[in-house]
Amino acid sequence: MPKVIVLDTLAQEGLDLLDQAPGIEYEVRTGLKGEELRSALNEFDGAICRSGVKITAESLEGNTNLKVIARAGVGTDNIDSKAAARHGIVVMNTPSGNTISTAEHAFCLMMALSRNVPAAHQSLAEGRWDRKKYMGTQLADKTLGVVGLGRIGMEVAKRALAFEMRVIAYDPFVSPERAAELGIQLSPTVPEMLPHIDYLTVHTPLTPETKDMINAESIKTLKPGARVINCARGGIYNEEALVEGLKSGHLGGVALDVYAEEPCTDSPLFGMENVVCTPHLGASTEEAQTQVAVEAVQLVTNYLTTGEIRHAVNVAPLDPKTLENIRGYLDVAYRLGLLAAQVHAGGVKSVKLSYRGEVANKSPKLLTASFCAGFLAKALEDEPNIINAEMLLLDRGVELSTETSTDTGSFTSSITATIEEGNKTHQVGGTLFGNNMPRLILLDGQRLEAYLDGTMFIFAHNDVPGIIGRVGTIFGNHNVNIAQMAVGRSSNQPGGAVGVLNLDGLPSEESVKEVMSSDHITSCKVIELPAAGEMPTWMR
């Protein structure tokens, strides 16, 4: 009989569901850590947790029994998902359970900030009637900027529209048509959005790309008196910059529910005027805790009784034989997705994947999911995989289509992705040499053959003598080593060409600027891909 351990306090509705689950035994053991936690995990088939317990690689060392962990919540920061995958343990989360509660809390903070609610309450509690001191501002006719239109960001935007606010949003994976349907104006970039908004809220994961996204420089581009809200992840706003923005008077207010370091009980923001802070309460509603508890229990019991996997963050439902047969092409598709995400400018409308030759018979649906996982990899906090990536892309209003043909072209097999964004179309194509050597063979109409790994420097140029040598000299002067080089000519644009350099490391901003300022260079881009042979956890 499968046994389940509950590691954190769980809503009673979740425990009731465990009581009713046929053929399932469970125990509640909270506050475990260290050797006690490691030993306990090896006694059970499934585990359910929230954010209190930390399941590290050490916690799973030597584990031969545990099969599944479900996190009653969105983030899985407290679970070493990669270590779990190495032990054959599926890690799942409940991505939609706290959506409404977090969206409401973000809106609550925005309203409290606008009407000075905390300070006005405090003045009354201290025996003062400071009615004139706390003049507020209404939300109607103001402009809200939303960074990230996932589940929570979309719910915040809907509420803002109901309050007669204008909404400008940035999300490179939401199509303009989808945004227009909802009455939302899309911005090509975050910097272009900032000067036009009265309020800013962020709903993205904390990644290297989003860390300190709102800093001293970006705050200067906001309207004087703009107010900022963060119910997503601490670290997206630079807290020192927020303090300086308030002191200078450029910021009209700051509302935070999350912090760079948590628990946070000491911050220069606490006690400042025009600041509203709460201790990470976004998901702290009875309804949200009930919902995530019930979902987590269902995930674990369904997996242990039927093998069903939903909302997994670290594995894919593949048997070893199938995985071994298509791993090479899964890798090609994944890398093409990563490349396409860094090449396109934003506002994706549609993605079309074409499979030609032998690959057309190698599980195109899984290959499409692998492409989607790569395409969204840098946009999501938890690593997307072939279980959830396609759904996540469709959630953003992107049209996804595929076509297959067993006819071979120049290569035995090829995968081509066409990305439509507004009035522009990008195209990338790849193939597999041998069993494990992904290659880039097509880039926006230009045929070439380039290694599809590591740091790539792609530059479009006029096909004139000496241009390749000039780029090489610039990188040499900046101590940037070129490992491989490929050049492609455009078949439909006479005189146009593209160069692809595989570099031994990231080039400096100075070297890239120098290349871009050279005559006959029309554009350039630094692309970061995994090293050769490096694959996401779910593909190994």
Image (cartoon, grey):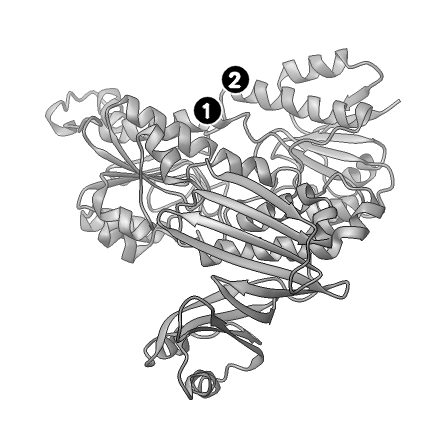
Residue type marked 2: Glu
* SS at circle 2: helix
User: In terms of sequence position, does the residue under pointer 2 or pointer 1 come before the other?
Assistant: 1
* SS at circle 1: helix
Residue 324 percent location from the top left of the image: 81, 52
Residue type marked 1: Ser
User: Which residue is painted at 78% across and 44% down in the image?
Assistant: 60
Q: Residue 208: in sight, yes or no?
A: no
Q: How many numbered discs?
A: 2
Q: Looking at the image, is 414 positioned above or below residue 459?
A: above
User: Which residue is painted at 46% across and 87% down in the image?
Assistant: 469
- The one nearer the camera, 174 or 358, is 358
Q: Where the N terminus falls, by quadrant?
A: top right
Cα–Cα gap, marks 2 and 1: 8 Å
Locate residue 217 relative to residue 434 in the image: left or right: left
Q: Which residue is mark 2?
A: 287
Residue situated furthest left in the rendering: 132
Q: Residues within 10 Å of mark 2 (few under 14, many from 20)?
A: some
Is there a contact, CB below 8 Å, between mark 2 and mark 1?
A: yes
Residue 95 percent location from the top left of the image: 57, 31
Q: Which residue is mark 1?
A: 101
Q: Residues within 10 Å of mark 1 (few under 14, many from 20)?
A: many
- The one nearer the camera, 332 or 429, is 429
Residue situated furthest front in the rendering: 407
User: Which residue is painted at 76% across and 66% down in the image?
Assistant: 434
Residue 494 percent location from the top left of the image: 40, 73
User: Which residue is painted at 59% across and 24% down in the image?
Assistant: 292
